[in-house]
Every structure is written in C-alpha cells, then in structure tokens.
Image (spheres, rainbow, N blue to C red):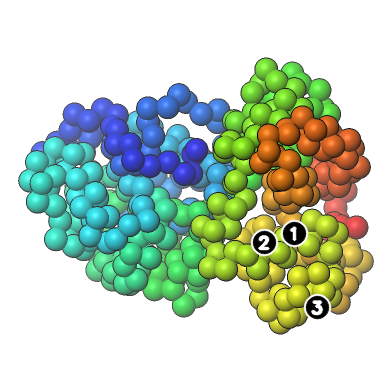
Amino acid sequence: MTDDVGGVVGSRHRAGPKRFGRAPRGGLDMGMDVTKDQHIFIDREEEISFLEEKWRSRKPQLIVIWGKRRVGKTELVRRFLEGRPHLYFLAESTNDRDQLERFSRAVGELFQEPLLETRGFSSWEEGLRFLARRRERLALVLDEFPYLIQANRGITTLFQRLWDEELSRSRLFLVLMGSSVGMMESEVLGYRAPLYGRRTGQWKVQPLSFSQASLFRPGRPFEDRVMHYAVAGGIPAYWTLFSPRKDFRRNLRDHVLRKGEFLYDEVEFILREELREPRFYFSILQAMAQGKRRISEITNATGIPQPTANKYLGVLIDLDIVEREVPATEEKPAKSKKGLYRIRDQFFDFWFRFVLPRRGDLEMGRLDSACDRIMGELPQYLGGVYERIAMETLRRHEKELFTFERLGR
C-alpha cells in the first residue's frame, strides 16, 4: 500500500558523486516499494504544485505532510521526487539504533560512500549535518516520522536545534511525513512542540472527493461508483484493491468480506496502531454504527462514563474517524447542545455497519449469504452516502451556484 510499505531498498539513477561531488540526478528510496507497478495516481495536482513551488524557491525547506493511513501521502511524494535528487527513508517501529543504522546505509548508498554503509553515523546530528553541507539541493523525506519520535523522544528537539544552527541556511529540502495524525499534530505541529514555528510549509493530505475517486471506475454507471464509494470513501489504496472487471457485489465479496483479505481486518489494525486502548474506541464506534449518535445514547450503550466518552470521542475526531454535527441553523455550533456524532471515515462506517455484525458467518466462510443480506440493506444505507456526496458537490461548486455560511442538515 502507498502508506504502509517497507523492507525494500531500491534506487533510481544511482550513479552519483563521491562526498564532494555533484548530487545524484535521481535518488534512493529506503523502504519504499519500487518493485511494484505504478499505482493509479488520481488528481493531486494542487499538492504537487505546492511541493514544486517550494522546490523552485531554492530556499531551505522544512515541510510537514500528514494525513490518515492509506490516503496516498507516499505516492504523492514519490511522484514529486521523480527526477529530483532525493533520499526517501521510511522509519519503522524499531529502536533508535537500528533506525540510524538503516539511515546511514541509505546515505552511504546514495552518495556511494562505502565507509558510511559499513561504519555509519554516530548520531542523527552527524547524519543531518552531513546532508546539510551538500552543495547541491537534496530532498530528504522522512516518512512515518512518529516512529522516530517513539524510538528517540529527543529527536524533535534535535531537529529544532539543527534547524536553527545549520539546516535553515542549507539547501536541504526536508520533508517530515506521518500517518499518526494525533502525534504529528501534537509532536510536530503543536504549539508546545519543539519544531513549532520552524516549518516553512505544511499540507494535510485529505481523502479524495467522490468525483475524484470515481476516476478509479471509468465508464462505470453512477450507481456502481456510489456503491464503491460507500465502502472505500476517498482512500486511494482501497480503490486500487477493487478489480475494474468486477461489479460491486463481487468486489465486496472478494475484497472486503473474505477472511484474510486486506480490508477484512483493516479497521482493527488501524485502531490497534493508533490507540492505546482500542477496545473502548471500538465499543463507541460500534454503538454509533447502530444509530447511537447522542452522547447520552453512546454512554448508555457502552457503559463508558460521559467524561471518559467525551475524551475518547475527541481523540476519534482528531483522527478524522468521527465528526460532530450540529444543525446548520445553530448560531454557535461549537457550543451547541444539539450536536450529534457520526462516523466520518466512510470505510469505518461501512465496516461497523455491515461487516462486524456478520463476522461469525464470515469466519465460517458463509460469504454469499452475508453478501446477500448486505446487498438487501444497502439501498437504505446509500441515502446517507448520497447526502455526503451532495454536500461535497455544493461545496465544490459554491462559487458557481450561490454562497452560504454553513452547510448541513
């Protein structure tokens, strides 16, 4: 997947300089799976233009890119890096020493420095100063940066000091990227974070709109595209799992409901990866999928005290999994007592609504009967999906139609 790959070391146009020569024309991708076929790349022109403008400025850059898992951050950056001198490094959930050793090998391989590949840098500071002193512009992308923070809690302070002392006067194009939305926003972007005020740009990569995601199903009827969107939402990685030769029912059966398939356990994987106590969040999401949208209904259904439930809901909102809705007529939405919660992530919403209740049948291999029941209930569910698409369309064409202060129900 675009945001969840690792273990493959590859390079493009590796021929390059010794220590004081010119920067390589291509780059090295440490952890990015460059052996796979090209992914379908859909409508990220605005994001690419943003990065290209920053690159053309020739100024040192510290850019933060973040967004939920599978949203397409890595593929976006990979497209931007093509033909530019770069080092892409994918951090892993391992200790700091192992990370630094992998980083040292990547730098040594990129610049054809055998000593670096074998001896390595003694510290992150040494490695970053080495790159900052290059004469040629180089893009350094540190993907899944939160893993580096977890392995070395002082690394953001180190980056802050190095930026102030040297990196901000170098030709380095530094990109810090991560899928852990909460950690990126608190540890990198937050007011109390050491790097606060140092970034030269930031971009939160959002899911694709319905019209953008529909490009994954060219020539298919509108209803087909809506049904696939009801499952995959705007996450490119999910759309690429669906076969263009199959109709919706077959894609649902073969790629969502079948045990062992990627999407079968995706929700549980993400919750375990992002949260310390996933079982409580799981209960809240399960209650919401059953129609419990008021805080009182959620606490009654889960048995979680209201103050704790409010805290958990806040975390889910920060992760873009849940949102709080208030009537469009409310003058002060943030203070409104009429707020209702709903699952914002389309795949999470579908999974809790249709897949989880049928896990028993699915574990026993009764895919067809489960699929039949889902298809029977789907038309009623699609009403809410149409609402989302309609509001999205209004926002996109606001200037052409009419202006509005708030949009909602």
User: Can see residue 97?
Assistant: yes
Q: What amino acid is labelled 3 in the image? A: Lys
Residue of label 1: 286
Q: Position of residue 331 (x, y in %)?
A: 87, 73
Left or right of 1? Residue 349 is right
Image height of 27 relative to 189, above or below:
above
Q: Residue furthest front?
A: 364
Q: Position of residue 49 (x, y in %)?
A: 51, 40
User: Can see residue 61?
Assistant: no
Image height of 162 relative to 43, above or below:
below
Helix, strand, or loop for circle 3?
helix
Q: Residue at x 84, y 64 (%)?
A: 292
**Cα gap from disc 1 to disc 2, whole angstroms:** 6 Å
Question: Mark 1 Cα within 10 Å, few/some/many (few <14, many 20+)?
Answer: many
Q: What amino acid is labelled 1 in the image? A: Gln
Residue of label 3: 335
**Cα gap from disc 3 to disc 2, whole angstroms:** 27 Å
Residue of label 2: 282
Image height of 157 relative to 268, above or below:
below
* Callouts 3 and 1 close, C-beta under 8 Å: no
Q: Residue at x 70, y 20 (%)?
A: 246
Q: Position of residue 54 (x, y in %)?
A: 43, 48
Viewer-side residue, 297 vs 159: 297
* Callouts 1 and 2 close, C-beta under 8 Å: yes
